[in-house]
Image (spheres, rainbow, N blue to C red):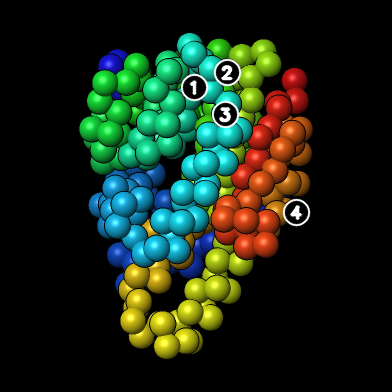
Amino acid sequence: MVEHGEDGYDQPRSNMSNTDCMVEPARQDVEAVNDELARRHPIDDYYDRSIFPIRWIEKRRLAIIRSFVDERDGMRIAEVGSGGGHVLRMFRSSKLTAIDVSNVFLDTARKNLRGYDVEFIKGEVDKLPVLPTGFDRVICTEVLEHTLDPQAILATIVRMLAPGGRAVITVPHDPLIMKLKTMVRRSPAGWVLREKINWGGDHLHLHQWTPSSFRQLLSRNYHVLEAAAAPSAVLPIRLCYLCAPKR
């Protein structure tokens, strides 16, 4: 393992309440905010011990990502916002690069990716002093909604890709998620689930997208080759895209 140190289509979110005990990242250090989010919502717990509907949705999202990546031996795969390494650990035959701003997430990823051919880079990808390039695939999944400038991240990913490389990008369909959570809160299940309804911190996202608004955002830098939704097209909680960069 190798270590390194350090827009008009969406609906921005800046309505964090005092009970969230977090500060909007525009007014606070991005690293500190992401570390706090990682501590409040442990990523291993999210994947392994959250309520069944969440685990089902995320299992489907991971399956879509694996299909879009279409791993071949010796591929170079990077993940922007690698979290705890739960996505990259699907790709044991590739040379991996995990990029994240949070030390808490990177520490978890080191544990989960022990034994893999992986390089860890700490920092915001659009502000790295030396940007890693030449990747066959760059994955950015459930990350853009946490960033101050999603368009800058998407443009940076274009620069990371090798000729013929592809980006695999997913975001939450937050307007639908919030409607579903409101329905659950008002039902008898809301009394049972209580705080688990907000597991994962969806209410802290800085941006929201619908399928059409996110495609508009992507269209500045990418051609969409394939689109899918998790857990299904009927219930599109996670919006998933395989993209070719516009050069």
| Dot 2: element | strand
| Label 4: few (<14), some (14–19) or many (≥20) C-alpha neighbours in 10 Å | few
| Image x and y of residue 91, in percent | 44, 26
Does residue 146 appear in the picture of this structure? no
Residue 136 is tagged as 2
| Label 1: few (<14), some (14–19) or many (≥20) C-alpha neighbours in 10 Å | many
Q: Are marks 1 and 2 in contact (CB under 8 Å)?
A: yes
Residue 114 quadrant: top left
For this rendering, which residue is in front, 165 or 133? 165
Point out the frontmost of discs 4 and 3: 3
Q: How many numbered discs, if any?
A: 4
Point out the frontmost of discs 3 and 1: 3
For this rendering, which residue is in front, 104 or 33? 104
Look at mark 4 in the image and give the residue it sits on: 212
User: Residue at the location (50% across, 74% down)?
Assistant: 181
Residue 77 is tagged as 1
Q: Are marks 4 and 3 in contact (CB under 8 Å)?
A: no
Q: In this picture, is 23 found above or below 44?
A: below
What separation in Å lies between label 2 and label 4 (alpha carbons)?
27 Å
178 left or right of 217?
A: left
Q: Earlier in the sequence, mark 3 or mark 2?
A: 3
What separation in Å lies between label 3 and label 1 (alpha carbons)?
9 Å
For this rendering, which residue is in front, 62 or 122? 62
Look at mark 3 in the image and give the residue it sits on: 69
| Dot 1: element | strand
